[in-house]
Image (cartoon, coloured by chain):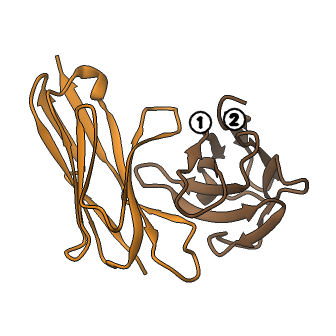
Amino acid sequence: GAGVSQSPRYKVAKRGQDVALRCDPISGHVSLFWYQQALGQGPEFLTYFQNEAQLDKSGLPSDRFFAERPEGSVSTLKIQRTQQEDSAVYLCASSSYGRQETQYFGPGTRLLVL
Amino acid sequence: KQEVTQIPAALSVPEGENLVLNCSFTDSAIYNLQWFRQDPGKGLTSLLLIQSSQREQTSGRLNASLDKSSGRSTLYIAASQPGDSATYLCAVKKGSGAGSYQLTFGKGTKLSVIP
């Protein structure tokens, strides 16, 4: 595709609900990243995939957060039993293979937990 | 742990002025540094990327410099325009080891250019 796409763009959840956020990376991009951006803050790293392998999940804040990329393309970030502190914008980025490559970001999913 | 600080947090300038945004980082062992632009409700757009071996990069009216040893970078915007109004984020990539693919961001500088 032309760029990284994310869906839904907005999600309102009641506390305790499970949510699933989707990311469609740029076609052919090997690397995929998830970041969390709280209001007034910079994005913070959550997890990194290389193809279908999750190589780094050190940024996931708790075991309620789970990410997958089963076929090495589309990725889903799942949050179980959502809490108010999970309210944030969740950004997905993709890049070609290699640390020198620029990460291209999607528009984000804004999650509000009531 | 790497920490990235951006000063000022917000800046308002009249159209046509030149301006400088500042970024500092605590660990000088970086692989590269990027400046991004973020518009409300949108994702991040990469503006300039400076490798650790480089001193500066230029694109149009934008110039970014890097002083790795002192842990500082500046983004210079010449002849500012209302369309430049956005939040500007600085991000560094770790030099090596665990976590070397992830970006560490500052909180950003919110720029308003007044017509």
The disc at residue A7 is none
Badge 1 sits on which subunit?
A
Tint of chain B: orange
- Return the residue at label 1: A107
Q: Residue at x 67, y 65 (%)?
A: A47
Q: Quadrant of residue A84?
A: bottom right
- Asked if marks 2 and 1 fall on the same chain, the answer is yes
Name above or below for residue A68 compared with residue A58: above
Residue furthest right as drawn: A71
Colour chain A is painted in: brown
Residue beneath the point at 29% across and 64% down: B5
Residue B92: image location, x then y, percent: 41, 64
Q: Secondary structure at mark 1?
A: loop
Q: Please report contact status of discs 2 and 1: CB closer than 8 Å, yes or no.
A: yes
Asked whether, in this view, residue B36 is left or right of residue A73, the answer is: left
- Callout 1: few (<14), some (14-19), or many (20+) C-alpha neighbours within 10 Å? many
For residue A98, what is the image quadrant?
Answer: bottom right
State the SS at label 2: strand
Q: Which residue position holds label 2?
A: A5
Decide if residue A29 is on the left or right side of residue B80: right
